[in-house]
Structure formats: structure tokens, C-alpha cells
């Protein structure tokens, strides 16, 4: 990959010990040569040993207050610390101080930090020594913050370092390998078949193919999520579950195949495994007059077919108010798996660009595209091995109506109780083959504990936990197609009385605000050697001092009351953009069936409480 090389990779356990490490001597020689040109001392530019790296990581955790750190300048910040830079990105791009007994210590930057399966993955990319010096100035300056437009800001520095993006991809790929999340999401070609997987990330701009990661399922917030365990006076965000051993042989094989000599080429573990099994096709060389592209290291042999899937995500904000219009956002991608022998070209027409008002279009590095009319755009591509994302798009207008309409109301009748009402309409204006697989409405209450819920919906079932109410309107296996459903749900909800945790407040005032509490209480003395989780402390601070109606932060969802809708629809798209399988052509001509499927899923599909304040963007009247 042009512009990205990796100097070293370390994987640490929750106990700050090295579980795995790998250095790349070829890249390191390039780093030393660059340092010699800039007059740097050799002892200050070499890579640290595993023990030195582990000690530096542990020291940083103590200095920053947690593994990630605060990301902003607080009372306890000091010049030379990541939080002193006053930029949240320092929670992911960290600095380590390497201390040596026989030589002067030095700064190691930029180190990419990624957490996976309770392990810490550290990746050190190759950057020019002068960039490290520029960052060192930010590290020591007296002022804080900085705009993206400023030339001496951290953002402007990182924008000129494409290796940062590549290093993040390496860290995530290794993290997925550790956690076992390397399987590709399925491509549903028809209602009865499922094949292969889909790459979820386009990286053509920097030349890397990355294996996708399945989106984590949303987990209901349990009671323990808002209560901290007091273990010390330092804020920690360390993993709380058992770690499984690392398969070092698997890691070595993946690193050797995906980034030979420290240069990332293909970070898809499925491709690497296939290459190791199949080889580079020496027995079946491509035609002499054709050049085999880098994204197709070996040739496919077998039954030929093309599988396409158009996948869209709808995000919405529904207010049901005259003064605030509802807003929708649609993004989509075309996933492809072309199992074709040789090195053919595929021509695919994309229809519906004008009616959908497509604003953003990006394509895989193997694709070429040309306009053939306002409603039609033709894409010509030489398909790579396996599944990949052929195109991504965003649209500002949709030909189909909103799949879920309605409103949500919640009014508090007392400090610990309220009445709510839902009136929803599902799949109005949709006909077969559109099929709603499921639809669920979730009412989260992250700042209160639910005591009881009274009420029966007109359709579906209700389940309750301490932090949320879940209303399943349409369940999997009992989908909805060709008809409209009107669903209502009214009832009352009661909460447990508020409980203030003074220990958390004391720890917060000391660790986060950097101030000293005046009262020397029993809780303060007992927690002197304890620590709490960062998220738990901030949540307790909000619960103690701020009421929902008084919080003025418009970007904080937990300050407002809302319900979230989740659904999945197959058989069509929301934007109206389509692919006609019969219009897909292959050159040289071969007999290969083309199957196309379409799916729409919900993103942040929010029903804001009509009776309360809700955040919204002001729209110009011009």
C-alpha cells in the first residue's frame, strides 16, 4: 500500500504484559535512515524491547488516568501528557515514553490503540521524523484545543499522514482475528440461498482490502452498567471479563501474508487463507495479453455466477410537530460476489440516480463508471476475489414513503412515574415484494431504573428490563407484506426513587475535576485506594447534578427522551435505486446467472417525545 508501512505491532494483556509482538526490520531500516538524515541520535530512534514497551504502556495508563485517557485537558493534566493536547483523538492515537537506564528516554508516536477481546492492540506506523517533532510542539504548548482549520492543530497534522488510516485498519483487522470476528456478513441472493460474505469497508484510496466486522448487537443496559465498582482512586476502563489465549501461529501467518515486509496489502483473512490453500494459480496462468490485477491474486475455477445485493440504511428523526419537520437520511451500498473464471469485465447499469437525487457516489478501486443518461449510470469493473463493496451512495430524496410513521408521547405525572402513548403506522404504501421481517420499538431510560410498566399494545408483545421497555410489533418468522398495520400502545411506567452515590461524586471531583473535597467523610477515606470506571463516574455526575429538562447540551441523547425503532425490510429499496439482472453483461461472454437481492435496515430511526424538548437542526427559510 502506497503511503503506509508498519514499524511494529504489540498485543498486551489486561495486566500490561506482552502477549505477542512483531517488528519489521525493513521498515525499521528506513526509519533509521530518515532519522540519520535529520540528525537524530540512534539510541533515541530504535524500537523499545517488549519489557520497555509494557512499562511505558503501564506508566501512561497511570499518567492519563485510564487506558484511553480523558482526551481533553482536565485539572490533573500536565504538559507532556496526551490529555494536555486537548483532543479526543488522543484516546486512540497515543504517545508512549520509553525510559532506558543506559540511555536517554524518548517519545514513541504515533501509536494506534485498539481494544479487542480484552486485549490491547498497539500499532506503530512509519512517519517522517519531522512529523514527530511537530507533534512534540503540540505536546508542550500552553494553550489548549484547536480548530481543524489551524495549521498547527493535531487534526491538520493527522490529515497529512495517510499511514494513520492504514495503521487503524491493521489494528482492527488484528483485533477481529483475536476476537474471532472475521466472518463476512451473508449475501442473500434469493429467499432460499445464502452465500459468501461482504466486505464492509472500501479502501481503494489507500490500496488495502479489509475484512468487514459484523456490527455489534445492541445490548440492553443492565443495572450494573450505571453503578461503578470501587477499586481505587484512579479512573479505569479496563476489560471486566476473562481473556482467551491468542493463537500466535494464526497471527504470524496472517501478518506474513497480509503485510509482507511491513507493507499492508490485503487485510482480509479469508483471502489470505484462500491464497495459502489455492496458491497463486501457476497451473492456470491468465492470458498473455491480460495483466492480472493486484486485487485478484488467484483465478477462480468452478460454477460461474454473479450475486448482487443492494443494502440501504435509513436514519430518521420523527417529531410530529408543525414547527419541526421530520428528517430522513439514506445511505446504501451495492455488494457483489462475482465467481467468474479468468479475468472478465462486468458491465452493470445502476438505475434511479435522478429520482433519488444521489449526492455521493464512490466505487471500488476495480471499477470504472460513465454516465449514460440522467437516470442511468453504467459501472464497468473487473471483479476481485470473493465478496466486496462495489459502490456506496447517499441520497437526499426517496421515492418510497417512510416505512414507520407515527408519534411517541411521554409525560411525567410525578417524579417517579409517567404516562406514555405510541401511535404508529407500518408499511403504508408498500406492496409485494416488499417484506418487513421484523419491527421493534425500544424506550430507553438510561438515567432511571424501571420499577413497573402497565399497559397492553394493540399488536405485538412487550418485555421490560431495569433500563428499557421493548415493544416487538412484528417478530421474525411472522413478517408483514402487502398490508398496512396501525399499532398503538399506551400505559404508565414507574421508576425506582433516585439514589445518590456519594463515593462516585467524591472520586469524580478528585480525578476528573482535579479539585480536593472539603469534607473528609467515611466514603472518602474508604475510597482513597479505589478506582471507578470513567463512564460510570460521568453517568453518576449527570444523575446527581443535572435534570433532563435543565441540561443544555444538544448533542447528548441521554438528556432527552426518545424511542428507537429497529426494522428490516427485504424485496426492495427505500431510495428506489435498482439493478436489473438481465441488463448485466459479461465480456468475454459467458453463461453465468445473475441474482440480485435488496434489503433495507434501520439506522438511528428515532421517535422524539412530542411533549418534551428535542434536538433538531435549524433550516434556512430562504
Image (tube, grey):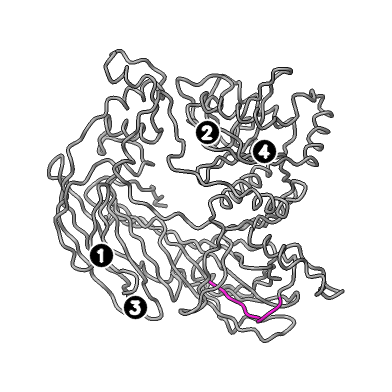
- Name the residue beneath numbered marker 1: 424
Q: Is residue 257 above or below residue 308?
A: above
Residue 50, numbered circle: none
Q: Residue at x 26, y 55 (%)?
A: 321
Tell me: 477 left or right of 131. left
Looking at the image, can residue 149 be seen? Answer: no
**Range of residues picked out in magenta:** 301-309
Dot in front, 1 or 3: 3
Instruction: Tell me how far mark 1 sits from mark 3, CA to CA.
Output: 17 Å
Q: Is residue 173 above or below residue 65?
A: below
Dot in front, 2 or 3: 2
Estimate how packed mark 3 is, as few (under 14), some (14 to 19) or many (20 or more) residues with alpha carbons within 10 Å: some
Dot in front, 4 or 2: 2
Q: Would you say the residues marked 1 and 3 are in contact, meaning their CB atoms lie under 8 Å apart?
A: no
- Name the residue beneath numbered marker 2: 15
Tell me: 543 left or right of 90. left
Which of marks 3 and 2 precedes in the sequence?
2
Q: Residue at x 16, y 47 (%)?
A: 494
Instruction: Tell me how far mark 4 sits from mark 2, CA to CA.
Output: 21 Å
Which of marks 3 and 1 precedes in the sequence?
1
Dot in front, 1 or 2: 2
- Name the residue beneath numbered marker 3: 481
Indicate the secondary structure of the residue bearing disc 2: loop
Residue 20 placement (x, y as % from top left)? 64, 41
Instruction: Tell me how far mark 1 sits from mark 2, CA to CA.
Output: 50 Å
Instruction: Tell me how far mark 3 sits from mark 4, CA to CA.
Output: 52 Å
Q: Residue at x 77, y 66 (%)?
A: 280
Residue 338 placement (x, y as % from top left)? 64, 74
Amino acid at each position: 500500500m502506497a503511503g503506509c508501512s508498519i514499524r511494529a505491532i504489540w498485543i498486551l494483556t489486561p495486566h500490561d504484559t506482552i502477549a505477542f509482538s512483531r517488528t519489521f526490520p525493513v521498515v525499521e531500516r528506513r526509519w533509521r535512515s530518515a532519522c540519520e538524515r535529520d540528525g537524530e541520535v540512534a539510541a533515541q530512534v530504535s524500537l523499545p524491547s517488549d519489557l520497555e514497551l509494557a512499562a511505558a504502556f503501564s506508566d501512561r495508563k497511570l499518567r492519563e488516568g485510564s487506558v484511553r485517557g480523558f482526551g481533553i485537558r482536565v485539572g490533573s493534566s500536565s504538559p507532556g501528557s496526551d490529555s494536555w493536547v486537548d483532543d479526543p483523538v488522543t484516546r486512540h492515537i497515543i504517545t508512549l515514553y520509553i525510559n532506558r537506564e543506559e540511555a536517554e528516554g524518548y517519545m514513541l508516536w504515533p501509536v494506534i490503540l485498539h481494544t479487542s477481546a480484552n486485549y490491547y492492540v498497539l500499532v506503530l506506523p512509519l512517519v517522517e521524523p519531522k512529523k514527530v517533532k511537530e507533534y512534540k510542539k503540540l505536546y508542550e504548548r500552553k494553550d489548549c484545543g484547536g480548530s481543524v482549520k489551524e495549521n498547527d492543530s493535531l487534526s491538520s497534522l493527522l490529515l497529512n499522514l495517510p499511514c494513520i488510516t492504514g495503521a487503524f485498519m491493521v489494528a482492527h483487522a488484528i483485533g477481529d482475528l483475536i476476537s474471532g470476528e472475521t466472518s463476512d456478513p451473508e449475501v442473500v441472493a434469493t429467499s432460499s440461498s445464502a452465500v459468501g460474505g461482504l466486505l464492509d469497508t472500501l479502501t481503494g484510496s489507500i490500496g488495502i482490502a479489509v475484512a468487514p466486522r459484523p456490527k455489534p448487537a445492541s445490548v440492553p443496559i443492565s443495572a450494573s452498567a450505571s453503578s461503578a465498582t470501587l477499586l481505587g482512586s484512579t479512573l479505569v476502563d479496563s476489560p471486566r471479563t476473562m481473556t482467551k489465549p491468542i493463537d500466535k501461529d494464526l497471527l504470524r501467518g496472517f501478518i506474513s501474508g497480509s503485510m509482507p515486509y511491513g507493507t499492508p496489502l490485503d487485510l482480509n483473512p479469508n483471502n489470505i487463507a484462500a491464497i495459502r490453500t489455492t496458491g497463486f494459480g501457476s497451473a492456470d496462468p491468465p492470458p498473455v495479453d491480460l495483466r492480472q490485477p493486484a486485487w485478484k491474486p488467484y483465478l477462480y475455477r468452478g460454477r460461474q455466477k454473479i450475486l448482487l445485493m443492494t443494502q440501504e440504511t435509513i436514519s430518521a428523526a420523527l417529531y410530529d410537530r408543525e414547527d419541526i419537520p421530520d428528517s430522513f437520511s439514506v445511505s446504501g451500498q451495492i455488494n457483489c460476489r462475482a465467481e467468474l473464471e479468468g479475468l472478465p469485465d462486468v458491465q452493470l447499469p445502476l438505475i434511479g440516480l435522478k429520482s433519488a437525487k444521489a449526492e455521493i457516489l464512490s466505487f471500488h478501486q476495480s471499477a470504472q463508471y460513465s454516465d449514460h443518461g440522467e437516470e442511468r449510470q453504467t459501472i464497468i469493473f473487473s471483479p476481485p476475489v470473493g465478496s466486496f463493496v462495489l459502490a456506496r451512495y447517499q441520497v437526499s430524496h426517496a421515492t418510497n414513503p417512510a416505512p414507520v410513521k407515527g408519534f411517541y408521547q411521554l409525560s411525567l405525572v410525578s417524579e417517579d412515574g409517567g404516562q406514555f402513548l405510541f401511535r404508529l403506522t407500518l408499511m403504508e404504501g408498500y406492496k409485494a415484494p416488499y417484506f418487513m421481517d421484523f419491527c421493534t420499538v425500544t424506550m430507553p431510560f438510561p438515567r432511571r431504573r424501571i420499577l413497573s410498566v402497565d399497559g397492553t399494545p394493540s399488536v405485538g408483545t412487550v418485555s421490560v428490563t431495569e433500563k428499557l421497555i421493548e415493544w416487538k410489533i412484528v417478530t421474525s418468522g411472522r413478517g408483514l407484506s402487502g398490508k398496512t398495520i396501525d399499532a398503538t400502545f399506551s400505559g404508565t411506567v414507574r421508576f425506582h426513587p433516585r439514589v445518590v452515590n456519594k463515593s462516585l461524586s467524591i472520586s469524580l471531583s478528585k480525578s476528573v475535576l482535579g479539585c480536593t473535597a472539603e469534607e473528609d467523610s467515611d466514603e472518602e477515606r474508604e475510597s482513597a485506594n479505589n478506582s471507578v470506571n470513567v463512564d460510570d463516574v460521568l453517568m453518576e455526575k449527570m444523575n446527581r447534578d443535572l435534570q433532563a429538562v435543565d441540561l443544555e447540551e444538544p448533542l447528548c441523547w441521554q438528556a432527552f427522551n426518545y424511542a428507537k425503532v429497529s426494522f428490516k425490510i427485504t424485496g426492495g429499496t427505500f431510495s428506489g435505486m435498482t439493478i436489473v439482472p438481465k441488463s448485466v453483461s459479461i465480456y468475454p461472454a459467458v453463461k453465468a446467472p445473475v441474482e440480485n437481492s435488496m434489503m433495507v435496515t434501520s439506522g438511528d430511526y428515532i421517535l422524539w417525545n412530542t411533549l418534551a424538548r428535542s434536538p433538531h437542526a435549524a433550516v434556512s427559510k430562504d
